[in-house]
Amino acid sequence: MKFQAEIEKRKTFGIISHPDAGKTTLTEKLLLFGGAIQTAGAVKSNKIKKSATSDFMEIEKQRGISVATSVMSFEYRDKIVNILDTPGHKDFAEDTYRTLTAVDSVILVIDCVKGVEAQTERLMEVCRMRNTPVIVFINKMDRDGKNPFDLLEEIEEKLGIQTQPLTWPINMGSDFKGVYNLFNKSIIAFGKNQKATENDLVPMPDLSVPELDTMIGEQDANQLREDGELLMGVYEDFDKEVYLSGQLAPVFFGSAVNNFGIKDMLDTFVEIAPNPRPRMTDQREVLPSEDKFSGFVFKIHANIDPKHRDRLAFLRVCSGRFERNKFYQNIRADKKLRFNNPYAFLASDKEIIDEAFPGDVVGLYDSGTFKIGDTLTEGEEMNYVGIPSFSPELFKELINNDPMKSKQLDKGIRQLTDEGVAQMFTQHGGNRKIVGCVGELQFEVIQYRLLGEYGAKCSFQHMPYFKACWIKGDQDKINAFIKFKSSNIVEDKEGNLVYLAESEWYLNTERQNNPDIEFYITSDFKHKL
Ligand code: G4P
C-alpha cells in the first residue's frame, strides 16, 4: 500500500476518565467491534484494582500485565485504530499525561451519575494545552444519573470546552429507552435485559409522528420532542473543523457494559478523528508524510524482575517508515541504535514487526539507553518538543541510609527518574535531592527498586511543598528571588530553576511580589501560570 494511504488509515487516540467511569469496559467493547478480541473479558484490565492500593508489588504486577494492553490496535471500516490506554490510578497520573503527548485525539468517558470528576479535570487540562480533539462518551445511562442538559453544562463549565450532543438519551436508569441520533435522525432502542444489537435503527426524521408514542411511550415521546426542539434551536450543524481545533467536543450517550451507544460513537470517530498530525521539534515542524523516519519515546516500562533487566520503550512514529534492523540516531544520547525485535501491540498480544507508520506505537527493548522524550531520527539533529514534566504533588527528600552505596543510589535514582517513575530535583547551590511524585505509591516503588536493582538503601523525608513551578525572567530579579527564597529553590535534571511552593497562598503571594518573574506549570516553559 502507498505510504500516504497508510498514514491516512491511522487514528491514534487515548481513552481517559476518572477511575471507574467505564474506560476499561469501553475499550473492550471497541476491541470487540474491531474484531481484535472475540469475547468480553479478554482484555486484562489496565486498571489497578482498588483492593491492591496498599500492596504496591501487586500493583507493579498488574502494571506488568497491563503492558500488553497499554497499546491496542484494530481495524475498523478500513481504518487502523490505535488505542493508547492510560492507567486510571491517580498515583500514576504522570504516565497518563505523557501518553497524551503521543495521541492525536482522545475519547473522554464520563459517568452520568457522578458527572465531571477531579481526575477528568486534570486530564482535560493536559488536552487543552495541546488542543487535542476530544469526543465525550457519557456512560452508565442505565443508571439514574444527572439530567443530560446539566451534564453538558457541567462539562462546558468545568472542562472549558464547548459540547455538542450527536446522540440524545431517551430517559435513563431503569426507564432508559435508547438514544436519538441527531445526526441521522433515527432512534436506536435500548433493549431491557438484553444486549442491544444496534441493528434496530428506526428512522425518525419527524418527531411529531404518533409512531414515536407507540415506540417509547407518550411521556418519553413528549420529552424527546421538547428536548429535540431545544437542541435544534441551540446547535448549528456539527462543524468538524471546530472539533479538530480542540474547541468543540461531540457528545454521545450510552452504556458501555451493555454495549449500547458505542457503535454510533465509533462510526463517527473513524470519520472525524484526526489522522496523524504534524508535530513540532526544536528545529521545525515535521510532517507525517516526510520520507525520513522520526519518532519519540513517551513511555518506558521497566521490568521489576531483577533477572530480566530489559526495559520496554514505547516509541510513537511521527514521520516516515520505521524499519526493523535499520540504524537510527538517538539524538540526545548521540548514539546509533538498531532494533532487531520491535513490537507492535495487538489486543492482548505482542507481535514482532518489520515496519511501522506514522501514528503507530512500537515497543523497543532497551537496556537503559532511553530517557522519556528521546527522539530517534535517520540522522537529522532535532528533538520533539511537548513532552514536558508537570508539577508533582508530593515532595520528599531522598535520604541515603547506607553511605557505602551512595554511587549506586545516585545512579539508581537517575535511571529511575529517566524512566519517568518520578522527578528529581537538586537543591540550588547544594546537594540535597528532592524526589517529586504524584502519589505515595511511587515512593514505595522507588525505595523497593533502588534496593532490589541497585542495592541502595534509602528512606524519604516529607517536605511541605505542594507544587513545583519552573521560573524564568530578568537575571537580576531571579537572583534576588533566589536569595530571598533560597530554601525553596531547586533545579530539575536539566538544570532549570524551579520554585517549590508550600501552598497556593505562598505561590500567589510570590507571583504578586515578583511581577517580573514568570512562573510556569510545565518544564518546557510553554504554559504560564
Ligand atoms: P475504569 O476502567 O474507568 O476504571 O472502569 P471500568 O470499565 O472498570 O468500570 C467500572 C465499573 O463500572 C465496573 O463495575 C463496570 O462493570 C461498571 N460499568 C461500566 N459501564 C457501565 C454501564 O454502562 N452501566 C453500569 N451500570 N455499569 C457500568 P465493577 O462492579 O467495578 O466491576 P465489574 O466487577 O463489573 O467488572
Image (spheres, rainbow, N blue to C red):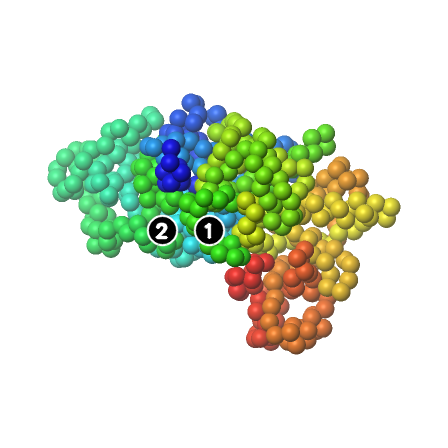
372 or 129: nearer the viewer? 372
Q: Which residue is mark 1?
A: 286
Under mark 2, the amino acid is Leu
Query: Residue drawn at (38%, 33%), measured in percent from left and top?
Result: 1
Relative side of 522 to 271, left or right: right
What residue is drawn where x is 61% and y is 54%? 393
Q: Position of residue 300 (x, y in %)?
A: 60, 41
| Residue at disc 2, secondary structure | helix
Q: Secondary structure at mark 1?
A: strand
Q: From the viewer's perspective, is 396 left or right of 2?
A: right
Nearer the observer, disc 2 or disc 1? 1
Res. 244 mark: 2
Mark 2: few/some/many CA within 10 Å (<14, 14-19, 20+): some
Decide if residue 301 is in sight here: no
Q: Residues within 10 Å of mark 1 (few under 14, many from 20)?
A: some
Q: Amino acid at mark 1?
A: Val
Quarter assignment of residue 452: top right
On the image, the x and y values in percent for residue 206 come to 14, 42
